[in-house]
Image (tube, rainbow, N blue to C red):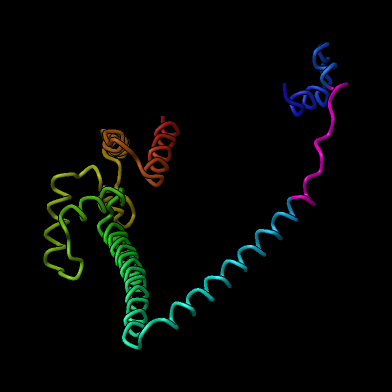
Amino acid sequence: MKLNEILKKIAKGEELTDSEKEFLNKYEEPADKSEEIANLKDQLAAMTTERDNLKTIADEEENKNLSDVQKLQKDIANLQDQVKNLTTERDSLKQTAAENAFRHGIEELARKHKCNDVEYLLFKAQGAKLDLSKDAKVSEFMESFKKDSPKFFDADVNNGGGGTPPDAEGGNDNNSQSRIDELLKKDSLSEKEVAEVIKLHDELNNQA
């Protein structure tokens, strides 16, 4: 039984059970441990400082017993550890920067070619180890990807000046319905495509 559950019932005006009333009657606020916790934190800080001081003293005593060559070797080892850590950090930053730059390039490529699934395009490009700096390879990759997976690309819509005049068979209606059917065949739709389906559907209903 938890206090907050009983308080929620009271706030809702619900009747309490006998066991809940008994729980409230026997309930005591937990003791305030904040001062004790603060003291423990102070003790920990003091012990940490003492440990660091003792380590410094121990290092100094150790160095007294080392020859100049041994001291130099120790300094070299410490520097090598620092260089190793900095190299690891640098490589990690370079990797992150390269991944971010590659993703940005893929996003630009998706916009240029009207690809509606950036994540899948990124996955395919990574699998193909695509070099975005080579235009010919990029064009070849995109043509192949579009040919193999046309559902991941927005269909080109011709918005010629003045619109397409309706023919005797209701050409505009047929075009709208065809476009709806085309979009609904996709496994997933972008927000833009969903809005387009809704718009076309409303236009067909208004013309009916």
Which quadrant does the C terminus fall into?
top left
Place of residue 115 in the rendered image (x, y in percent of width and height, measured from the top left): 27, 52
Quarter of the image for residue 112 reads bottom left
Q: Which of 165 and 42 lies nearest the eye of the viewer?
A: 42
Identify the residue at horizontal 27%, vertical 36% (top origin): 186
Q: Is residue 176 above or below residue 16?
A: below
Q: Is residue 204 left or right of residue 52?
A: left
Quarter of the image for residue 149 reads top left
Q: Is residue 64 above or below residue 153?
A: below
Place of residue 95 in the rendered image (x, y in percent of width and height, measured from the top left): 30, 65
Which quadrant does the N terminus fall into?
top right
Q: Which of 31 and 21 lies nearest the eye of the viewer?
A: 31
- Residue found at the very far front of the displayed protein: 65
Q: Is residue 101 above or below residue 145?
A: below
Residue range corresponding to the magenta coloring: 24-36
Identify the residue at horizontal 71%, vertical 60% (top origin): 42
Q: Is residue 161 above or below residue 61?
A: above
- Residue found at the very far top of the displayed protein: 18
Place of residue 153 in the rendered image (x, y in percent of width and height, measured from the top left): 25, 48
Q: Which of 106 and 170 lies nearest the eye of the viewer?
A: 106
